[in-house]
Amino acid sequence: MDNEMFGKFIKDLRKQNNMTQKQLGEKLHITDKAISKWERGLSFPDITMLNSLAEVFKISISELINCKIGDKKKINIEQVIEDATNKLAIVKKRKINKIIRIISIILFVSFFILQLGYILILKKYDYEYAVNYIFYIVNEVLILSFLGIYFTLIKNKKSINIIVIIFAVILTITNIAFCINNEKNMKSIIKFSNSFSNELVLKYNKKTKEVKYYRAKFFIFARYKEKFANLAEENIKINWLTKDICSITYKDENDIIREFVATYGDRGNGISYNYVSNSLTGDWQVLSQYGSETKLIVDSKGITINKKDKTELFEFSSCKQFGTIALVLYKDDIPRYVIGLNEDCEIDEKTDIIKKGTILLSEISMNETITEVLNCIKYKNDDMSNYNISLSENDYKIKNGILYISYDGEKIIEVPGNFSNETTKNYNESNSQVLPEKTFFTYNENTKKYLVFSDDKGENWKTIEIGSSRDYIQNIHFINSNLGFMLVFEDVAMGQAFGTIKKTIDGGYSWQVISNGINETFSRGSNIRFLDENTGFLTIPNAGGEYQELYITKNGAQTFEKIILENNEIYDYYNLPTIENNVLTLKITQGSDGDYNGGDYKIYYSEDNGNVWKQR
C-alpha cells in the first residue's frame, strides 16, 4: 500500500464528509496532528484504528485499505500494514540519511577550507588558532563528516566498511594523541573584557616558560604580536582595568614580579602617536578606600605618587609605555604601578595632554588588584599649549618629542617638527640659536635632516630639508637673518672628516657649497665661525686633542691661511676666536697634554678682523 495514496484517500473522504482534521481526530480520540501526518504520508494508522476509521467514513476496511470505494477485494490487513510500515521506515531512513549527508558535506567542505586556509595562508602571516586544540577539533570534524558522507552515499561490502571504520579510528586516536601531547606542553590563556569587546590571548610554554602575546582575530584566530621580556611561572594573574586595558602580572624564574599590559584602544584621534607621560601632565588625586588621599603629580621631574603617606618619584626613564593608553612605573627595575587613561579621557590634539577625563592607578602585585580612579585638580583652560611648561627668557626644552621655546620667559611657543629623536642636551651654541632676529634648530625624521627657523620671534616658522639623517651637522651659525654658514660631515674615518662648508644668503632656504676643507678634508672635531661673508675661521684638531690648528679665510672659504702666534709646543691649542666686549679674542691653551705652569693659557686680540693679533 502506498502511504501517500492512502493519505490522499483519507483527506478526500474527510472533505467529502465536511470534517476538519480536528473533528476527525475527536471522533477517533486522537490529535489533529496525527491526522495531518496520515494525510501527508508521514505515518500510518495503527491496526486497531482501521475499524474505527472505516466506520466514521461508512466504508469497509477493504475499501479503506485499497484506497477505493467499491473495491472490496479481500486482503491480508496485517500484511498490508506491515508492508506500509516497513516502506514508511525505509522512506524515513532515506530522509534521515539525506539530511546527515547534506550536513556532513557542508561540515566537511567548510572545515576543509578552514583548515587548508589556516595551513597554507594564515600561518604565513603569524596567525594561529587562539586555542591550540581547535586545530585537532577541526581534524576530528573532518574525520566524522567524511564518515557521514561515506556511509550515507557509498554502498560497499561489509569488509570495506570495516576497513574504513578502522582507518577512521586510527586517525582519531592519532589526532587525540597529538592534541594531548600539545596541551601537555602548551597552555592557551584566553580572557575577554567585561563587555566582550576585546579578547586577550596568551600562549604559555610549560617547558621553556615563554609567554607569547597574540592579537585575537575572528574569535578563533589570533596573530602573534610579541614575546614577554621575561620567562614566567605558570601562575599568571590577568585583570582587565578597562574594556581595552588588560594588566598581566607574573613572576619570573627568579621569583621577581613582572608586568605586561595589553592595550586595544586609543584616546586621541587614532592617527598620531601620543606619549602617555606627556598626556598625564598635571596634578591628580582621589580619596582612597583607606581614607587617605592618593595623589599623582606629573611634571618635568617625572611622576610623583603620594600614597599611604609615602612619596615616590618615578623618572620618565624608568617608565615603560604600552600602546598609547597605559604606562608602567618601575623602581629598581621592579614594576610598581600601572597608570591607564580611562575611557572618558579626551586628549588635546595640539599638546597631547588630557584636557578632560580621569585616569586609573593600579598597584602591581600578585594579590587582589585594587584600582583607583584619579581626577585632575589643576585647572586647564581651552589653550593647552602652555600647560605646565615653564621656561626662562630665551630658553627652550624638549618634552615628550615636542620642543618648546620662550623669548620672554612667559609666552611658550611650540616649535614645529618631530623632536622625538632629540633631547635638550643635543643642542648647543654650535648647532642651535635663540635670538630675536634668527632662531633655528635641526632634527631628523624619516632618514632626512631638517632645519626649522624663525626670523620673527616664533610667530612664523619655516622648515627646510638640508640633507640625510646620516649627515652630521657640526656647526650652523647665522651672522644675521639672511647670512649663515654650516659645517656638515658626510663621513668620518681615522680622525679625518669628509664634508663641506655651506653658505646661505637667503636665511636658510637654499645652501651653496663653498669649501671642502683643508686639502679636501676636515678633522673630526673641526668647527667654523664667520665674522662676515668673507672672513671666517676653521679649526683642525688632532685626534687626541693635544693640539689644534687655526685657519683664517678672507675670501669666503675659497682659501685658508694657517694662523701661527706661538712658535712652541706648549701653547699649541688654538680655539675659535670669540667676540668679547666688541673685540675679536683668541685663546691659546696647552691642549690635553699640557701641564706647564699649571696649565695656563695666552690671550690674543685683534681689532681688524684677524689681520693683526696682539697679546693681552
Image (cartoon, helix red, strand yellow):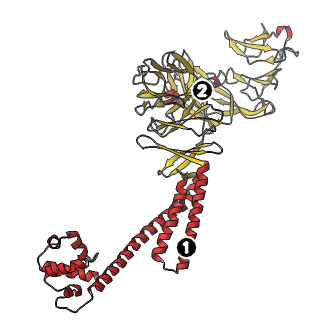
Calculate the distance from the C-alpha at mark 2 to the C-alpha at mark 1. Answer: 64 Å
Question: In the figure, residue 104 lies in which quadrant?
Answer: bottom left
Relative depth, front residue between 363 and 87 = 87
Q: Is residue 571 above or below residue 453?
A: above
Residue drawn at (50%, 15%), measured in percent from left and top?
309
Q: Is residue 386 visible?
A: no
Of all residues, the one furthest to the left in this rendering is 18
Relative depth, front residue between 292 and 89 = 89
Amino acid beneath label 2 = Ser
Residue drawn at (42%, 40%), measured in percent from left and top?
194
Q: Is residue 169 above or below residue 374?
A: below
Of all residues, the one furthest to the bottom in this rendering is 73
Amino acid beneath label 1 = Val
Residue drawn at (74%, 19%), measured in percent from left and top?
576
Relative depth, front residue between 146 and 437 = 146
Question: In the figure, residue 60 lies in which quadrant?
Answer: bottom left
Q: Residues within 10 Å of mark 2 (few under 14, many from 20)?
A: some
Of all residues, the one furthest to the right in this rendering is 568
Number of numbered discs overlaid on the protein picture = 2
Cβ atoms at labels 2 and 1 below 8 Å apart: no
The residue where tag 2 is placed is 318
Q: Name the disc covering residue 164, or none.
A: 1
Relative depth, front residue between 555 and 464 = 464
Picture coordinates of residue 242, whole percent (x, y): 44, 35
Picture coordinates of residue 533, whole percent (x, y): 67, 24
Pair 2/1: label in front: 1
